[in-house]
Image: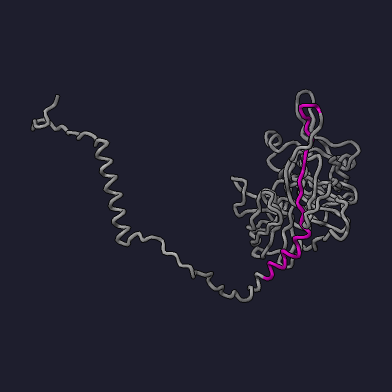
Amino acid sequence: MANAMDPDRRTTVVSPAPTVNVWLVTLLLVVVAALMLRNAGLFPRALHNPLAESKPVTPRGDLAADELSTIEIFQSASPSVVHITTTVVRQGLRLSPTDMPEGTGTGFLWDADGHIVTNYHVVRSADAAQVTLADNSSWPARLVGYEPDKDLAVLKIEAPPEKLKPLPIGESDNLQVGQKVFAIGNPFGLDHTLTTGVISGLGREIQSANGRPIEGVIQTDAAINPGNSGGPLLDSAGRLIGVNTAIYSPSGTSAGIGFAVPVDIVNQYVPELIRSGRVERAGLGISPVPDAVAKELGIEEGVLINQVIPGGAADTAKLRGTYEEQGKIILGDVLIAINDRPINRTSDLLKTLDGRRVGEEVRLTLLRDGKSMSVTVTLQSRRQR
């Protein structure tokens, strides 16, 4: 064992741990010191004042003009906003169908006939939906129609006309970055929640519920959270300028980047959904080769036609598809422009046809066997459902 006094050894001598008695003595000293300090006035006993009263309220004065405007917008628009609850039918253990809650969302009254606009993804997987109005009355809703490409759906309830207050419709083609906007919805099931912000960007592009691009989308920093989907985005005049549809957030909650389908698109498609339950979309009567496959085949730009639907618009215009002959792939026509608008990939084709009507004539620019050519095609109906 090392000698603690040996100068040639550098050994640290560790003192034994304090005993229990030492700790008790220390605790007792702390208590005594606290009592002494209290008696000395550092920790005085509570002094009760039986005459204590509430402080007088300082008058606030008039609300600011922008506050009054925001309050008016909310009070005017909120009766038009509804809470949507969806359910699905599940087979129970006793083999009897059971309605199970699926999710919640927001919608708004489109007209006095009980039509309600919301997002397609709110009702996509539902078997039934219940709509709660601002007066807390609930009504079963029927699905009238939907347009997945624009993430829009229309429901209908049979409520008395006096309960139905449609939103005034605005326009979105003249919006400007910096304009004030107001979103009303039911985030996390909290009904009629108002958030405010500005238009942060215009002309954005997002993907719809079925993966197709939606162009011209409004970007806003007004907080949009789960449950806000399908709710209205309003301008400072209280008019509908968009339908809140998505947020950009890794956590799934508002991060200051929300998106709304512009009202010009909504006002174009909703009447079609009410009339016929679907949107008649214009098409060429072709199926394209997937972009990645086309690139492997040496097509860097343009859309390679895979199949030409017999009897369709492209077939009438004598367009050629891609086929295999004796183990060799014979490339079809490559579509590179429509009415001089460049087509570099399939998404460009979909976006270009999006604003066209069935029966409209368009001029196609094609590459056939390496040579450029133009063909006029009358657009046909593209059935999706």
What x and y, as percent, mark residue 287?
Answer: 80, 37
Colour mode?
one colour
Q: In the picture, residue 91 is in which quadrant?
A: top right
- Asked if 322 appears above or below 268 in the picture, the reply is above
- The stretch in magenta equals 68-95
The answer to whether 350 appears left or right of 53 in the picture is: right
The answer to whether 67 appears left or right of 165 in the picture is: left
The answer to whether 45 appears left or right of 245 in the picture is: left
- Asked if 190 appears above or below 331 in the picture, the reply is below
- The total of numbered circles placed on residues is 0
Q: Nearer the viewer, residue 365 or 197?
A: 197
Query: Residue 190 magenta-drawn?
Result: no
What x and y, as percent, mark residue 188?
Answer: 67, 49
Q: In the picture, residue 243 is in which quadrant?
A: bottom right
Q: Name the residue at 88% across, 45% down.
A: 380
What x and y, as percent, mark residue 321?
Answer: 81, 35
Image quadrant occupied by the C terminus: top right
The answer to whether 69 appears left or right of 365 in the picture is: left
- Asked if 246 appears above or below 38 in the picture, the reply is above
What x and y, as percent, mark residue 107?
Answer: 77, 53
Q: Name the residue at 63% across, 59% down.
A: 200
Query: Residue 75 magenta-drawn?
Result: yes
Q: Nearer the viewer, residue 361 or 242?
A: 242
